[in-house]
Amino acid sequence: MAQMQRKRNNSSNRSSIASSRSNASPHGNDGLRNVIHDASIHVTKIPEELYEAELYRLQGELVKLQKWVKATGARVVIIFEGRDAAGKGGTIKRVTEYLSPRVARVVALPTPTEREKTQWYFQRYVQHLPAAGEIVLFDRSWYNRAVVEKVMGFATPKQVQEFMRQCPIFEQMLVEDGIYLRKYWFSVSDGVQLKRFQRRLDDPLRQWKLSPMDLESITRWEDYSRAKDDMMVHTDTAASPWYHVLSDSKKQARLNMIAHLLDSIPYEEVDDANTPKIVLPARPAPKGYIRPAVAVSQYVPDHTADVVTAQAERAAKRNARKGVKKKPKKGVTAKQAAKAGRKSGSRDGED
């Protein structure tokens, strides 16, 4: 009876998308609907200012983690898996925003080539594993076989079965060799996923994110859920457990994932006592160098000045139509500054 009541509640909460998925399973939402009433599972709304402050603090800790990884020669592998539009890419961007690309790199492999299809399945991923002092973030990983390839029929049942048997052994080898392996599954509800797909469809700058696989995931929601549940049964091990990230709120998902990652790795702040202090050298006195005239070099056009001038002209026209006389600003106007900039050209050391 309780399960039937939960079904009715979930159905009423998702009435706005019932037409696209009228026969939703009670095990949707990546297996979370059956515990949706658990008080520990909820969307936490966080004020923008507080979110930015906490994200910046966590990113500072990520920089400390990077220094520790580089100093100790540690190796870190972070796997990002989950539904399409679950927020994996945005979280990866926040993780790597202030990290060196020489230390932390993102691996997002395309469809395997014909040659790679004949290799041992894990082979194409092994070459991207970190060396000493490196962090590798997999934007989707070898788990493609357990979910996407299985659902879409790109892998045979035998290949999927072999993966389920070999994957725990493969990951056990990585862990035993000293790699810090962290696996995160970003869980988004079907309603939120559909809204994000719609925003991508309406935004020309994001339409590229909508792939045929994304569209298939809408109609195969339950197939993906079952594949994911089966994957968890075989690969959620003591040596390399899965960590679920509730991602109906992207901000909440980012903070929770980064905080957990930092808590799960025993990094320490590296003592800079033996590191030479960075001191900017004094600029030497001029030795007679004369910079060539601006006209000699081919500079990119000053698009910024054109945009500022056009905006000022539009504003002047609007004010003229309203009969408003705008008081002249003190100092140099934007048009004058743009004109002066064209004459003087770019200067060394200026952005």
Image (spheres, rainbow, N blue to C red):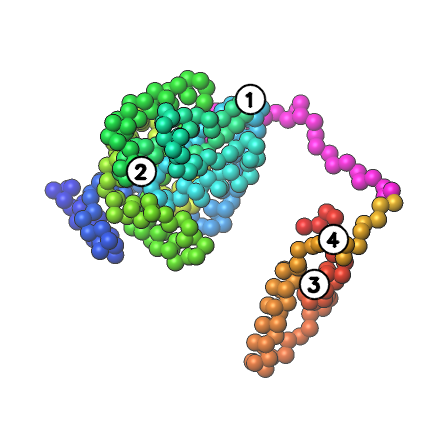
> Which residue in the protein does label 3 denote?
338
Badge nearest the viewer, 3 or 4: 4
Q: Residue at x 43, y 25 (%)?
A: 126
Return the mark for residue 148.
2
Earlier residue among tags 1 and 2: 1
Q: Amino acid at mark 4?
A: Ser
- The residue tagged with tag 2: helix, strand or loop? helix
- The residue tagged with tag 4: helix, strand or loop? loop
Earlier residue among tags 4 and 2: 2
Q: CA distance from mark 1 to mark 4?
A: 47 Å
Question: Which sits in the foreground, 346 or 12?
Answer: 346
> Which residue in the protein does label 4 denote?
297
- The residue tagged with tag 1: helix, strand or loop? helix
Marks 2 and 4: in contact by CB < 8 Å? no
Residue 337 is left or right of residue 198, and the answer is: right
Badge nearest the viewer, 4 or 2: 4
Residue 120 versus residue 286 in the image, above or below: above
Residue at the limit of the structure toward the front, as seen here: 114
> Which residue in the protein does label 1 denote?
72
Q: CA distance from mark 2 to mark 3?
A: 53 Å
Q: Position of residue 236 (x, y in %)?
A: 31, 27
Question: Which sits in the foreground, 140 or 195?
Answer: 140
Q: Residue at x 55, y 35 (%)?
A: 101
Earlier residue among tags 3 and 1: 1
